[in-house]
Amino acid sequence: MEKELIEKWLICKQEANCTFADNFQYENNSLLKGNTLFLSKLDIWEDFIVAIFLLTVVCAAYGFICFFCGVVSITTLAVISYVRYLKVCGVKRGDTILLHPKTSLIGIYCYAGFWALLPIFRVGAYGPEPYGTSCTLAWKGYPVFVTFFLFGCVLLPVVIMNLSYAKIIWTSKMAQRRVSVEARKSGPTLKKRDAFLIKMTFCMCVAFVGLWCPYAVVSLWTAYGGEGEVPVRLTLFAVLLAKLSTVVNPILYFMLNKKFRPFLKKTFCNKS
């Protein structure tokens, strides 16, 4: 039909005997065909834009949840170490609000929420990780935010943990030296407790620093380095180690706890 219409219109144009109706019929048909093609392309672009928008929203939500939970985990370890320092060392501020679990939890979640919401308000950004299987902070293009994040969410908790546990060990040793002659009979017990405390503290701090240091190094390298300088496998390895810290710390704590090991053994032996 369209082919016949075009041929008819060309013939009548050559013979100069086209009527107004012929011209209108062809031009109207051509216009309709163009509009149909344009509307079809517009529908495709709309679907494409909606898909990109949904992927962006899902990626940002996933990155927000992972980042929020990671900061909660790190901050919780720092708060636990400081609260333990207040209790063990008998600080005069022992009745501080941090000793109240509800207050501590609210503070931890507010602190994590503050950092996790900053990329939502364009201070930073969430985006796909280099290996393309998940989303996290956009390291590239936001060096200032990445630097402050590493200071506030990695370096500061590490310093608090190390100082708190170091003070606990120091206080325990000083208390052992001040014990009376009668209490010195329990010296071996105190030494065992000190050894357990030192071992558990050392393992948790080393695990924490060891698992998060690669992530911090890769983040700074990506933020301040050139495009494509960081190998994708190295990025994947650093991210997996950082996420593994939430599993390693509880395992270390419970496995080194003498009261927990018999319970664990009894539970699995009864099942078998």
Image (cartoon, rainbow, N blue to C red):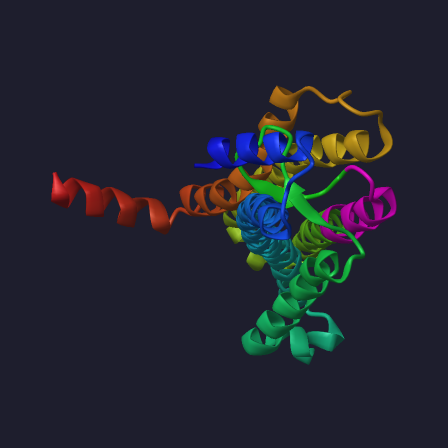
| Frontmost residue, 30 versus 37 | 30
Which one is in front, 111 or 52?
52
Q: How many marks?
A: 0
Residue lying at 21% horizontally and 47% vertically, measured from the top left = 267
Prevailing secondary structure of the magenta residues:
helix
The residue at the point 35 percent across, 50 percent down is: 260
Decide if residue 54 is on the left or right side of residue 168.
left
Displayed quadrant of residue 72: bottom right
Q: Is residue 115 above or below residue 87?
A: above
- Where does the image place residue 173, in percent across and percent down from the top left? 69, 50
- Residue at 66 percent across and 65 percent down: it is 113
The question of residue 150 being in magenta is answered with: yes
Which of 48/72 is in front? 48
Q: Residue at x 65, y 32 (%)?
A: 210
Q: Check the image and report above or below for 205 versus 171.
A: above
Q: Which residues are magenta?
A: 140-157
For the N terminus, the quadrant is: top left
Q: Is residue 63 visible?
A: no
Q: Quadrant of the C terminus?
A: top left
List x then y, in percent, for residue 237.
59, 26
**Is residue 272 found left or right of 225 in the rendered image?**
left
Q: Position of residue 48 (x, y in %)?
A: 56, 45
Residue 15 makes an appearance in the image:
yes
Q: Relative to 191, is 1 on the left or the right?
A: left
Q: Is residue 252 magenta?
A: no
